[in-house]
């Protein structure tokens, strides 16, 4: 029951006041902020630029100890040595995914980690180590995700958090962010009480066609296919 007026204002703007979307955002925050986290999910915020994605992502990052956060993009997950930082982190947050097609290695690695499988992490000039702890993943992008081939198991793990409207001109992000930071404990306590992952799965939005301008017009489970990629 904590009062968080700055956050509530942003949430109203993002969701256009829709209660079901507010509930989804609060359940996502709860999942990202509590332990243990055993769901086979990762979160994608998109797609409108300048819509508050980075503000929310940076706020979540500040709730974690600095050494427990990695910042790898989805593409970097497919690299040989780039994933070493995952060994020491509990959450991976990447807030500016580029417009690129995800390769099979990145898709496979993310599926295995979110599925609770151990993976081998290669380290430069050192022996490999096993990553065998649960991790959470939060991404933000201005572009729909694209993969090399259709992979329903991968797409089914996406929980989409829609930021469909550009931020209203004249609002101050730094002021808003500092107000949130002064109220970390009330907001984190309130969102933690909202985490019930089975209901959240019912709200998953897996694939989109095009770039819907508003949250009110996005279409769940619509799939568009080009000659090489799915989106």
Image (cartoon, helix red, strand yellow):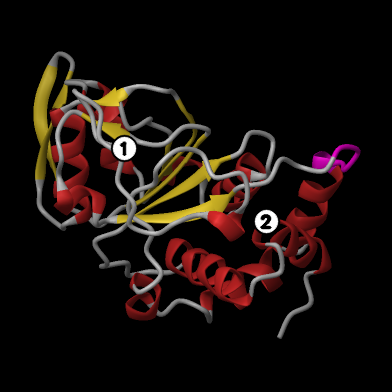
Residue 162 placement, left or right of 50:
left
Q: Which residues are magenta?
A: 169-174
Position of the C terminus, as image quadrant, is: top left
Residue 132 placement, left or right of 83:
left
Circle on res. 231: 1
Quarter holding residue 76:
top left
Q: Is residue 10 above or below residue 209?
A: below
- Look at 79% across and 58% down and name the residue there: 182
Q: Secondary structure at mark 2?
A: helix
Q: Residue furthest right?
A: 170
Q: Is residue 219 above or below residue 194?
A: above
Where residue 216 appears, x then y in whole percent? 60, 60
For the residues labelled 1 and 2, the Cα–Cα distance comes to: 23 Å
Give the residue at mark 2: 14
Taking depth in this image into account, of 2 and 126 the one nearest to the observer is 2
Taking depth in this image into account, of 144 and 190 the one nearest to the observer is 144
Q: Residues within 10 Å of mark 1 (few under 14, many from 20)?
A: many
Quarter holding residue 108:
top left
Q: Is residue 38 above or below residue 148?
A: below
Q: Residue furthest bottom?
A: 1
Q: Is residue 15 above or below residue 47?
A: below
């Amino acid at each position: 029951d904590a009062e968080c007026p700055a956050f509530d204002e942003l949430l109203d703007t993002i969701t256009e006041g829709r209660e079901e979307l507010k509930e989804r955002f609060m359940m996502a925050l709860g999942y990202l902020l509590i332990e243990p986290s055993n769901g086979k999910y990762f979160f994608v915020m998109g797609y409108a630029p300048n819509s508050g994605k980075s503000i929310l992502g940076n706020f979540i990052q500040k709730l974690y100890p600095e050494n427990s956060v990695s910042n790898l993009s989805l593409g970097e997950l497919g690299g040989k040595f780039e994933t070493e930082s995952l060994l020491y982190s509990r959450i991976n947050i990447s807030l500016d995914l580029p417009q690129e097609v995800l390769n099979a290695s990145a898709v496979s690695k993310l599926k295995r980690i979110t599925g609770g499988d151990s993976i081998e992490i290669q380290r430069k000039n050192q022996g490999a180590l096993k990553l065998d702890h649960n991790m959470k993943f939060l991404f933000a992008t201005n572009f729909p995700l694209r993969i090399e081939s259709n992979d329903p198991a991968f797409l089914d793990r996406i929980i989409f958090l829609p930021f469909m409207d550009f931020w209203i001109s004249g609002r101050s992000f730094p002021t808003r962010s500092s107000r949130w930071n002064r109220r970390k404990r009330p907001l984190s306590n309130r969102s933690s009480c909202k985490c019930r992952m089975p209901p959240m799965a019912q709200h998953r939005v897996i694939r989109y066609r095009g770039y819907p301008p508003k949250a009110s017009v996005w279409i769940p489970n619509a799939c568009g296919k080009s000659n090489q990629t799915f989106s």
